[in-house]
Image (cartoon, rainbow, N blue to C red):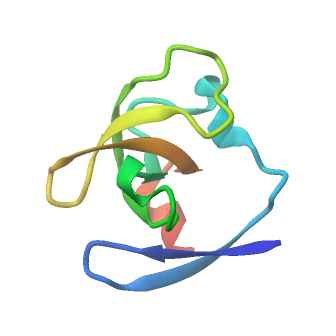
Amino acid sequence: MKKLVLRNTLNLIKEINISQSDDTHHWRKNINVGDFVCLVKKEHQRTGELSCGIVQRLLTSKARHTRGIKVMALNDQGEKIYGRVQEIYKDKNEKKK
């Protein structure tokens, strides 16, 4: 298990455990409009800093992408964010567990 540190818009840090074999974010079929996701923006690929939001559009047309499916999402402030999905939560409250 690998620990992933999330920093949200209020600079609160959360740690979640992720399995390295979990590749659900690589498959387009696993991501739907309205899902709460954490994604990595292009400018944060080196640091791995994640931003979270609700999926508005799926931008990757292929069924699978090795670095994650690219999406447009809305964050807590209603701003559009673009990036590749790293974590999928069917419900925003699921992340808080």
Relative to 28, residue 97 above or below: below
> Looking at the image, can residue 17 be seen?
yes
> Looking at the image, can residue 89 be seen?
no
Q: From this viewpoint, which residue is outermost toward the bottom?
A: 12
- Percent position of residue 22, x then y: 78, 50
Total tally of numbered discs in the picture: 0
Relative to 27, residue 81 above or below: below
In what quadrant of the picture does the C terminus appear?
Answer: bottom right
In what quadrant of the picture does the N terminus appear?
Answer: bottom right
- Percent position of residue 3, x then y: 69, 77
- Left or right: where does residue 92 sit relative to residue 68? left
What residue is drawn where x is 34% and y is 45%?
54
What residue is drawn where x is 59% and y is 15%?
62
- Percent position of residue 94, x then y: 53, 62
What residue is drawn where x is 38% and y is 60%?
51
- Left or right: where does residue 68 sit relative to residue 77? right
Q: In which quarter of the image is residue 67?
A: top right
Relative to 14, residue 48 above or below: above
What residue is drawn where x is 66% and y is 35%?
26
Relative to 58, residue 74 above or below: below
- Left or right: where does residue 25 sit relative to residue 31? right
